Each structure stands twice: as structure tokens, then as C-alpha cells.
Image (tube, rainbow, N blue to C red):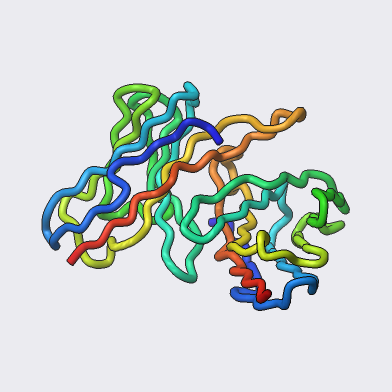
Amino acid sequence: GQQVMQIPQYQHVQEGEDFTTYCNSSTTLSNIQWYKQRPGGHPVFLIQLVKSGEVKKQKRLTFQFGEAKKNSSLHITATQTTDVGTYFCAVPISGSARQLTFGSGTQLTVLP
Amino acid sequence: DAGITQSPRHKVTETGTPVTLRCHQTENHRYMYWYRQDPGHGLRLIHYSYGVKDTDKGEVSDGYSVSRSKTEDFLLTLESATSSQTSVYFCASLGTSGTGGTDTQYFGPGTRLTVL
């Protein structure tokens, strides 16, 4: 089935530093979604990318979809303690637009 | 967040006992999902439903069954719980988000299940 690799698994940063997580697929994706899960919470949808080379911003978060639609990144500028959590990418399972395969997630710790 | 609740929120049970987890949504969403979350594995799909009485297997369905008798309720049953089924279980339903009408999964708060 469809698989997506997400790196790194863990990232510790000092508050104010930048952070980036990456998702990579061996096949071309129709779209990719990003979710955030706070400690002890549930995943919450952040954004969907559809177009080749697409870049979307949400305040300090920048999301990119690769030109070949096989990879994506989430970049946080000047992290804050409120950014703590695990960030997941999710891609449609081949042949089923309404099922997702989730990456293993990047757990972000922000040190004050 | 969409109105999705899960019950119970925590459960401790013994190996070999049956366990049923309930997911309830008030959004009239057609699609619903059960995932398990384990360290290093992200979220893995157990079963999903595409309508009342319409269900199908996901990536890790062995040892689990589901039922959906009403749009709002999706039940996950462990017929005979094993220690390998100790996990956090999330239910989700599929709605739309944003002005573009993006299909988005809305998650419940999760159930932490421990099988001794």
C-alpha cells in the first residue's frame, strides 16, 4: 500500500529557532495533508496541498509541495512553546481518495 | 472541531476479554474511521465505514471488528483482547474544511486501552 516516510522522528529546538519536518513518497501524490497533535490531544487538520510546487503559509508555518509531488515539508519560523506537539503528514491511499496513510510523525519539543 | 466523542476514554482490561469502543458523531458524516496510535507508527487505519452497515478493512484489521447501525455511531470491538492491542484508539469522521471544501478528517479525543 501507499507509504510515506517522515523525518526526523524527534526534534528539540530552542524557542526562537526554526523547525522543519519532511515527508517523502516513492510515488506521485494527488495531494498531501498535514495534521498537528498536541501532547495528550488528538490530531487536528492544518492544511492540504494539491498543486505541484505549491506553497501555503499559516502565520509562522510554511507548507511546501514538491515539484514532482513526491515530497512535502512543513517549516516553522521562530518556534514558540505553543508549537510543541507531533506533526503528521497524510496522503491518500492509492485508489481511495477518502482513506489516508499517515506518516510516523515528527515530535517537536521547544525548550524555553 | 466536529462533534465527535469516544467512550470510554480510558479502559484497563485483561487478556482474552471482549472490549467495545464507541464513537459518536453529530455531524451526519458518511465516512468514519478507527485508528490505533503507537509510538513510532503514527496512526494506522484499523477499519473504516462508508455508510450505515458498509464497512471495510484497513491496514491493521486482524483481531478487530466494527459495526455501524446508525450514521452517528461506529463501534470497534476487540473480540478477545491481547496485550499487543494496548494502544490509543482514535475515531475520525470525514467532513469538509475551508472555502475550498477540502475533505478533512476530524478526530475524536481518543481512548487509551490497556490490556494486561
Q: In this view, does B60 lie to the left or right of A52?
A: left
Q: Where is residue B88 in the image (x, y as percent from the top left)?
A: 37, 57
- Name the foreground residue: A18 vs B23: A18
Q: Position of residue A23 (x, y in %)?
A: 69, 64
- Name the foreground residue: B110 vs A94: B110
**Please, is residue A10 above or below residue A81 in the view?**
below
**Please, is residue B64 above or below residue B72 in the view?**
below
Residue, far front: A112
Q: In this view, does A96 lie to the left or right of B51?
A: right
Q: Where is residue B70 in the image (x, y as percent from the top left)?
A: 33, 22
Q: In this view, does B43 lie to the left or right of B5?
A: right
**Please, is residue B52 above or below residue B48 in the view?**
above
Question: Looking at the figure, which quarter contains the N terminus of chain B?
Answer: top right
Q: Write the residue at 29% across / 55% down.
A: B62
Question: Looking at the figure, which quarter contains the C terminus of chain B?
Answer: bottom left
Q: Write the residue at 81% across / 56% down.
A: A60
Q: Where is residue B9 in the image (x, y as percent from the top left)?
A: 32, 48
Choose top left, top right, bottom left or bottom right for residue A10. Answer: bottom right
Choose top left, top right, bottom left or bottom right for residue A61. Answer: bottom right
Please give the count of numbered marks on the rendered protein: 0
Q: Write the residue at 43% across / 54% down.
A: B59
Q: Write the residue at 42% across / 43% down.
A: B91
